[in-house]
Image (spheres, grey):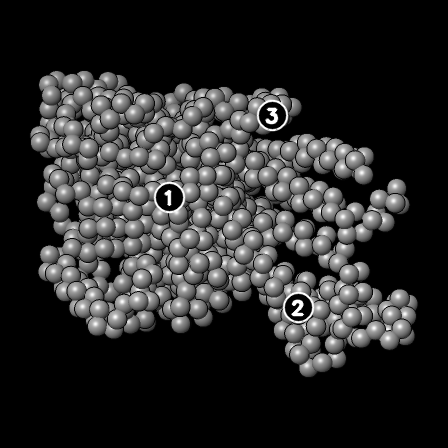
Amino acid sequence: MHRFTSPKAVGAAATAALLSATLASAAHAANMSFATPGDAYTLDPHAINNTFVLSILGNVYEPLVRRAGDLSLEPALASAWKQTDPSTWRFDLRRGVKFQDGSEFNADDVVFSFDRARAGGVKNMLTTIDSLTKVDDYTIDIKTKGPDPILPQELTSWYIMDSGWAEKNNAAKPGSADNKTETFASRNTNGTGPFKVVERDPSVKTIFEKNATWWDKPVHNLDKVTFFVIPNAATRVSALVSGEVDLIDGLPPQDAERIKTAESLKVVSGPDLRVIYLQPDMARDELQYSSVKGKNPFKDVRVRQAMQLAVDVVAIQQKVMRGFSVPTGTLIAKEVNGYDAESGAVIKPDVAKAKALLTEAGYPDGFSVTLDCTNDRFMNDEAICIGVSGSLARIGIKVEPRAQTVGKWAQQINPPGYNTSFSLVGYTPATYDAHNFLQTIAGSRNAEAGRGVFNIGGYSNPKVDELIAQIQIETDTTKRLAAIKQAFQIIKADAGFIPVHQQMIIWGVKKNIDVVQPADGSLPLRLVTVK
Amino acid sequence: MLRYFASRTFQAVIVLFIISLIGFALVANLGDPLAALLSPDATEAQRAELAASLNLNASFAERFLSFFGGLWRGDFGISYRTHEPVAHLIWDRLPATIELAFASLILTLVIGIPAGVHCGVHPKSMLSRAIMFSSIIGVTLPTFVAGILLILVFAVKLAWLPSFGRGGVVDLGFWKTGLLTASGWRALILPAITLSLFQVTFIIRMIRTQLLEVGQTEYIRFARARGLTESRVWYLHALKNTLLPVVTIIGLQLGNIIAFSVVTESVFAWPGVGLLFLQSIQSADIPVISIYLILIGAIFIIINLIVELTYPVIDPRVLRSR
């Protein structure tokens, strides 16, 4: 058709296009596209507890209580909540909210979503809940198994689905790996959120459109958002530079300089909630992968302290991460509830003191140990391991990094085997609260208490366990924070973990786009504006 | 003739069974699917429950039998990662890979055969030397470097072509094709060139060597002695006899192109089975990886079978020698 249009017609069309563009900008409506390394591989909000999947779905589905850009709590589908007794929370539900298919939101949907989530991969978020009951159409009560002072924080990724829609489409059960058929909700959505999915090509692209009937006043000015999946980092950067996409996640540190100096682009980076740390095996009587036989050097606190003093996290930040990390002395991020600046202070490397401690412990010539690493999980993970190896070589500990893909690495180090002597691990507390870290990582392994599941090195201190139990039920904020502080101080003194740094989130963004970058790595489209 | 076909087909079926066994054995030890399925703060009980529901604790033989039984019934299982049927996932992606593979095969043939013949017939000409010299690039440059260089030049600097994706796709119901839209064709160019780069140089070098060898043989000299024209000698007599190995190689190359599209697909975010394979490896998505490996094995076997079945047509001596 284009071939036959006269130059005049082309001119007219161009004018029309220009005109409509001006009109569009006058109405502050805009399109935007972004690319990330991976896809939200299911659209079912209850199928899997994966941070990225849930953060993408957070644009479509909504929780009772949501996170603002600075991760503080904001009312979403619940307009207010209060603790009526230590183990009961009452939530007032927002009235007049409609799902994207037009049906009304009420307490029945919350009850339905509770049962559905508890049958799916996200059930972990709701483990402290004993029961959820409907009081009336716009009020629900949640009873917890014991006092749970941080319940609202635990609910920010638990999304509400319409019961009528799910039942009509035979999706009342969440998708799971052992289902015989896929569920309707894996590919289709019906939330209450600011955007709706209008087109979906799994692992290729997903197109969102603004939900015109959203209950909240939009901050964004987006009409249509296209989300592309581009696994290769170099291609992703190229797509940004060539203007095919407006924003990319996972900008490699080595490309950040180039983006910074580009005329129309900017780098948006900030600390991530994830903390990267090293953990030695303190549980076995003999290490599996070490030159030391018959005993476990990591059981000696002096050896662990020596290693802590030898690892130079600032050098790793400068040399390996090109500045894109926040070195830390503790195991939770600054943005996590319970962070304490005193424990967070970076440990200054002191090679002489480290050597002396090692000699005192009976290893004047050091020893060798294998360090288990991923090479595709954390930012520059393999390079960090090589850096750590260099650091520890200074005190005679010969570290051999063994880098594997995350699946293989996890198979080896994860429970129930914990087959590692020394590993590089990263963790983000799911509730953005210190208790989740303590319970999962630092508590003594105890399957019954659900404690220390991911305590790869088997660190164990009864005092810490006691504090964890106390923190879990303490409703007085000051006392709770004091207990958290104490726990992290003990852990630091024990040197059961060697903190490395907080990772950073690095985005490449077109200059005309304003974004908010929360520390949990999500991209809330509701806070994006295109100028 | 019939016996020849029957024995070849029977062999293919046995090889396919062995491939599915090896594929499954490899994949079963690839990684922990639970790590990708559970959140890190999952309890021991939750791990055990999921492992039981996925039948991960059963013996290897038991799991293989149930897997193979499923294959037999046409049930390829459910992806651990996306919770979609594996057959559906792969079928969704296969058109992209096949279109890319054929595009680069056509490029390979259109560029490779004439260039190879030229280099074989006129090995000393300037053009031949230039071709042979530049073919070194194709042999030595790794696919992902070539792909990224092409992106930098044609997508970033010149902005002529897209750097990723497949462009507009038309769903024909049974086949999603990118060949019916202009953006689909534009998106195909860079990945097809990247994927064919190695193949082209391979074909050029092979045809050249074959022709140089044939050029020394007695019958070519006799043909010359009989006073046949140079072009008749080369294009009728010599080329015919170089064809047999070339057909085999081209057939196997097609298998290679499909199998090695993994790298190209990941560089260009080309939504084919190769990219699916990479994404599945990361999360130890056993059902998808097993089926992918078996599929690639099957493609090789089928291509090989077709190639072997065409031998007697090109060269009747294959049958006579039996």
* Identity of the residue furthest to the bottom in this view: B126
Q: Are marks 2 and 1 on the same chain?
A: no
Image quarter where the C terminus of chain A lies is bottom left
Residue B119 as seen in the image, left or right of residue A155: right
Amino acid type at circle 1 is: Asp
Does the residue at mark 2 contact the one at mark 3 (Cβ under 8 Å)? Answer: no
Q: Residue at x 46, y 39 (%)?
A: B174
Above or below residue B125? Residue B3 is above
The image position of residue A429, as x and y in percent, is 33, 39
Whether residue B4 is visible here, answered yes or no, is: yes
From the image, tell me which residue sits under label 3: B72
Above or below residue A448? Residue B222 is below
Q: Residue at x 49, y 34 (%)?
A: B86
* C-alpha span from label 2 to label 3: 45 Å
- Residue A201: which numbered mark, if any? 1
Q: In the image shown, does B27 or B225 lie closer to the viewer?
A: B225
From the image, tell me which residue sits under label 2: B114
* C-alpha span from label 3 to label 1: 29 Å
* Identity of the residue furthest to the left in this view: A95
Does the residue at mark 2 contact the one at mark 1 (Cβ under 8 Å)? Answer: no
Q: Could you classify mark 2 by the number of other residues whose Cα lies within 10 Å: few (under 14), some (14-19), or many (20 or more)?
A: some
Q: In the image shown, does A411 or A483 lie closer to the viewer?
A: A411
Question: What secondary structure is marked by label 2?
Answer: helix
Nearer the camera: disc 2 or disc 1:
2
Amino acid type at circle 2 is: Pro
The image position of residue B272, as x and y in percent, is 49, 47
Q: Are marks 2 and 3 on the same chain?
A: yes
Q: Residue at x 37, y 61 (%)?
A: A239
